[in-house]
Amino acid sequence: MPTITRREFLKVGGAGAGALAVSGLGFDVALAESTKVKQSLRIAGAKESHSICPYCAVGCSLVAYTRQTSDGKTQLLQIEGDPDSPVNEGRLCPKGATAMQLATSPRRVGSPLYRASGATGWKSVSWDFMLDKIANNIKSSRDATFVATDGNGNSVNRCEGIAFAGGAAFSSEEGYFATKLMRGLGLVHLEQQARV
């Protein structure tokens, strides 16, 4: 019988116990390897684009994988957290993990919808119509609620009938630009989602 040292016995025993524990938990190494291969094949050759999650003010980084289809359209293959980001280190919250549904959901609205006053349903309209409608509504609301002077005769030049809420996905520059634009219209009711 060959002699075995205590160190060799512990190595063999530890490896055997580890293998037994892993197999007892239902972990199959072959399955894990096949999943890894499928994943690499799915995004192999895909274009990698970096973006920011639009849901909140944290600013988690995303990586989107896209590929050109034969008809020239871009197909979104996958969105995941960016492991190189110091903000989220590749992790995403439940909302961020569903970011792909923003682009691929069959329930996503593809064009502006408008419901006229007194109408019972929504109708699809063009972006030009919707932007003109918004601009007209802003102008009429500003004209109706603009205050040039307060009760003491002081010049205030403010619009009290419109409020603005900035989105969490705004960059600092976009937030600054939006604030300047709204202040230029005389708005005093400004809010920003990304102030956490």
Image (spheres, rainbow, N blue to C red):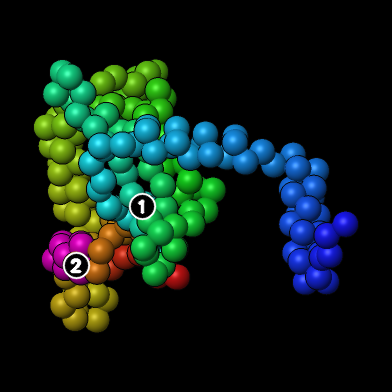
Looking at the picture, how far across and down is residue 175, in whole percent? Answer: 24, 65
Looking at the picture, how far across and down is residue 194, in whole percent? Answer: 38, 65
Which amino acid, by three-letter code, is at mark 1? Leu
Looking at the picture, how far across and down is residue 153, in whole percent? Answer: 19, 79
Pick the front one: 27 or 71: 27
Answer with left or right where residue 88 lies relative to residue 33.
left
What is the secondary structure assignment of the residue under circle 1?
A: strand
Does the rendering let one see residue 186?
A: no
Which residue is situated farthest in the right direction here?
Answer: 1
Few, some or many residues within 10 Å of mark 1 (<14, 14–19, 20+): many
Q: Nearer the viewer, mark 1 or mark 2?
A: 1
- Quarter of the N terminus within the rendering: bottom right
Residue carrying label 1: 62
Instruction: Judge whether residue 12 is colored magenta.
Output: no
Q: Is residue 153 above or below residue 107?
A: below
Which residue is situated farthest in the front direction here?
Answer: 1
* Image disc number at residue 173: 2
Looking at the picture, how far across and down is residue 188, in whole percent? Answer: 28, 68
Numbered marks: total: 2
